[in-house]
Image (cartoon, rainbow, N blue to C red):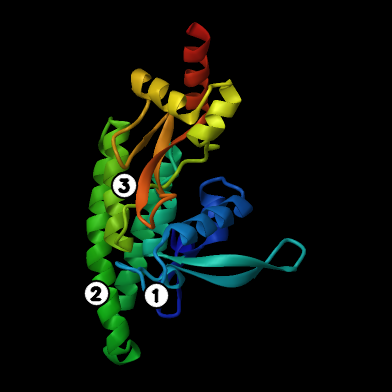
Amino acid sequence: MNSLVVMKNKQAVTTSLQIATSFNKRHDHILRDIRNLEKDIPKVGEKNMCNFTQMFFTGKAADSYGRDRRIYFVNRDGFTLLAMGFTGKKALEFKFKYIDAFNAMERALNKLPEEKLNPVLQAELAVTRAKTAKANALYRIAMATASETSKQTLLANAAKEITGEMIIPALQHKEYSATEVAKLVNASSANKVGRICNKLGLKAEQPGQNEYGRWASSKSKYSNKETPQWLYFDKGVTAIRQAMLKN
């Protein structure tokens, strides 16, 4: 467990490579997921901005041939965001192992003489611990609930504790807009797809997701205001297609 989390820049971190190994995922997929999170996390200057580079910062590690490859160092907050989309019993076991490893490393940090940690870092660690404790509590509740919609809502609130934004970690699904679904199923318009979707009750409660799709935010064509948009997974497309065939 000790190898899951290490100390770097006077904070407890893991690496994208270690996460990929622990959760039996391809490293390039983990890198992709981190880059997707970077797009969703508010940028500097925006309201409730959370600094992506504090949660994820780049480094290098040698591959099996001794060549340098890019990795990310990931702190506790970054790991909490990234791992929310990992599902399954085995994944849950590793999540708890990581939580324990982060706690152990932070206890070790707390035992360091105060002069080794500057006041700013001490303050940041205190704030991080408070936010992460609440996020972890919400996360544990989410993992214990049987309702997928409630689970995703709790996970979104856990993410909000860290980033200030309601971020839903999308599972590894291909996603389609209503316009794209209309083309796939030969529907006359995206509005028709939306009407069928509503009739079938495919949409989850906002801002959640389910087996048919998920809610996302998109810019309105007529203003800078963001509006909720339902994105369809493959199972959602199949449900729309079957409904079209019955009509």
Q: Earlier in the sequence, mark 1 or mark 3?
A: 1
Coordinates of residue 18 in the picture (x, y in percent): 54, 58
Q: Which residue is mark 2?
A: 126
Q: Is residue 131 left or right of residue 198?
A: left
Q: Which residue is mark 1?
A: 11
Q: Earlier in the sequence, mark 3 or mark 2?
A: 2
Q: Which residue is mark 3?
A: 155
Q: Nearer the viewer, residue 7 or 119?
A: 119
Q: Who's the residue at 35% across and 55% down the image?
A: 225
**In this view of the protein, can residue 173 be seen by the observer?**
yes
Look at the image and tell me in which quarter the N terminus lies. bottom left
| Label 1: how many Cα within 10 Å (few below 14, some 14–19, many 20+) | some
Q: Amino acid at mark 2?
A: Ala
Q: Nearer the viewer, residue 47 or 227?
A: 227
| Label 2: how many Cα within 10 Å (few below 14, some 14–19, many 20+) | few
Tell me the distance, in whole angstroms, between the alpha carbons under discs 1 and 3: 24 Å
